[in-house]
């Protein structure tokens, strides 16, 4: 189980996705937000039609409305225009709500008692009108770039990587250009090129990992909100080098060896490829390690079969979790960059097994019991369901958690709303 905040991996968010706070697990795909602290017993946060709802772990039967803002009707928030994330903006150890609206960045502070303060505008930039930022052009994150315990704001804009440092008192320093690269003007496009934040060299500061046209690049963080020049570390796993496409081939970052540093895992045509982290900001060349979970090898499709990295047996090494046609498949990590053959561990949450659909039903491997092993949470047709992990990778039959976050019941619907599974308190 990774407990080091430096292992957080943050990557591009897309409308309609669910997000997990995976500090002690892996990010699952390239649609992940910033965790504020290590996940233990995860809560559910939903940005709904009329308000923000939370479902606290331990009181899973009680859904609470906490903010009449950041919602479709309350505030006019739209997934195609406005990014909404979670992160600790104050350093108090609780997770706040962060929205990139029309006028800029707004924060609703967590009071620590199942309530939030009204949203306040903290930066007049990074917004739809304030700065002309667009969801389909400009990834935006909140992340602790300087090891202060508070998340800064980082955006991949036209000019490059732009950063606003958190002063800790609900103010932010003037925006700076953290790196003249990875931006729209440098040729980076959200439909072709993935961009991640991750501590790849183990010094505790987040770095940038970008899957460009022909190379994977790494720009190491200096710890002051700026980054060293990007260097090519892999000549593969990209659209120009190997034919890797966002709509066909997920690429993830996560520690599959247990050394505390994220590796690269790619789901290609022929199978699963792994590029092991050398520990110095570079990676070994990718190797084909498993002939499954892939576009040709197994018939896996991005629009039908979500694939994740998560520790399902509590050994500190990330395993593969795949939601296939027949249900949930697990491939246990051997700790050397290879995996055991996948096994069907649950005949549910699948395309045929249960009728689960990517465009309607969110499915997430996340620890909600605090034992360090990922359970399965699914936002189904009528209820949010959980399948509990016994800590060894064996899963129970799904049981109901709540109805309000499901499709199409209650406040939450995939298209106009967002859901997070995160540790709020």
Image: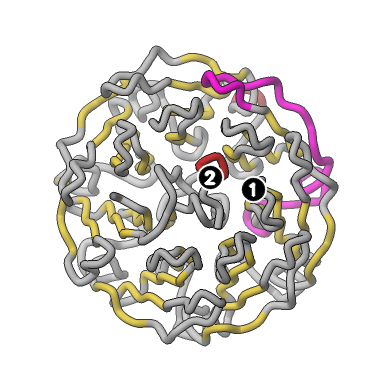
1 and 2 marks in contact (CB < 8 Å): yes
What is the distance, in whole Å, between disc 1 and disc 2 at their CAs? 8 Å
Give, as a single range, the part of the protein colored magenta: 221-249
Q: Is residue 363 visible?
A: yes
Taking 93 as reference, is 223 left or right? right
Residue 313: horizontal and vertical position, in percent? 57, 71
Q: Quadrant of the N terminus?
A: bottom right
Residue 134 placement (x, y as % from top left): 44, 33
Q: Is residue 265 left or right of residue 414?
A: right
Secondary structure of the residue carrying numbered label 1: loop
Numbered label tally: 2
The part of the image, by quadrant, that contains residue 125 is top left
Q: Which mark is residue 391?
A: none
Residue drawn at (32%, 22%) of the image? 123
Quadrant position of residue 293: bottom right
Residue at the spot of label 2: 4
Is 257 situated above or below 92? Answer: below
Residue displayed at 50% across by 42% down: 5
Q: Is residue 8 above or below residue 258?
A: above
Q: Residue at x 42, y 50 (%)?
A: 15
Is residue 59 highlighted in magenta?
no
- Residue indicated by mark 1: 260
């Amino acid at each position: 189980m990774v407990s080091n905040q430096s292992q957080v991996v943050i990557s591009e968010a897309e409308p309609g996705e669910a997000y997990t706070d995976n500090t002690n697990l892996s990010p699952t795909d390239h649609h992940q937000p910033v965790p504020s602290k290590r996940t233990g017993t995860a809560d559910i946060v939903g940005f709904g039609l009329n308000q923000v709802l939370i479902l606290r772990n331990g009181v899973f039967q009680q859904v609470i409305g906490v903010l009449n803002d950041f919602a479709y009707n309350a505030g006019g928030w739209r997934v195609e225009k406005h990014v909404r994330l979670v992160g600790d903006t104050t350093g108090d150890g609780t997770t706040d709500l962060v929205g990139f609206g029309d006028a800029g960045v707004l924060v609703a502070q967590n009071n620590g008692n199942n309530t939030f303060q009204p949203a306040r505008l903290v930066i007049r930039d990074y917004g739809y009108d304030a700065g002309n930022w667009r969801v389909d052009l400009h990834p935006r994150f909140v992340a602790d770039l300087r090891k202060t315990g508070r998340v800064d704001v980082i955006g991949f804009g036209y000019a490059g990587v732009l950063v606003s440092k958190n002063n800790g008192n609900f103010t932010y320093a003037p925006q700076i250009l953290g790196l003249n690269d990875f931006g729209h003007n440098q040729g980076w496009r959200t439909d072709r090129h993935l961009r991640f934040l991750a501590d790849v060299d183990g010094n505790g500061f987040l770095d940038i990992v970008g899957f460009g046209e022909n190379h994977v690049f790494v720009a190491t963080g200096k710890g002051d909100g700026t980054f060293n020049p990007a260097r090519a570390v892999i000549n593969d796993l990209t659209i120009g080098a190997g034919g890797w496409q966002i709509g066909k081939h997920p690429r993830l970052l996560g520690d599959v060896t247990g050394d505390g540093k994220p590796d690269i895992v790619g789901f290609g045509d022929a199978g699963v490829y792994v590029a092991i982290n050398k520990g110095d900001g570079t990676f070994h060349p990718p190797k084909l390690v498993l002939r499954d979970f892939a576009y040709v090898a197994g018939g896996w499709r991005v629009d039908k079969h979500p694939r994740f990295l998560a520790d399902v047996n509590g050994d500190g090494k990330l395993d593969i979790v795949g939601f296939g046609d027949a249900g949930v498949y697990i491939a246990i990590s051997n700790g050397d960059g290879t995996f055991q053959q996948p096994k069907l561990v649950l005949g549910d949450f699948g395309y045929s097994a249960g009728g689960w659909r990517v465009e309607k039903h969110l499915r997430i491997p996340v620890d909600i019991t605090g034992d360090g092993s990922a359970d399965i949470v699914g936002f189904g047709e009528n209820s949010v369901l959980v399948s509990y992990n016994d800590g060894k990778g064996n899963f129970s039959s799904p049981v109901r958690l709540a109805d309000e976050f499901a499709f199409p019941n209650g406040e939450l619907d995939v298209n106009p709303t967002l859901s997070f599974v995160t540790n709020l308190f």
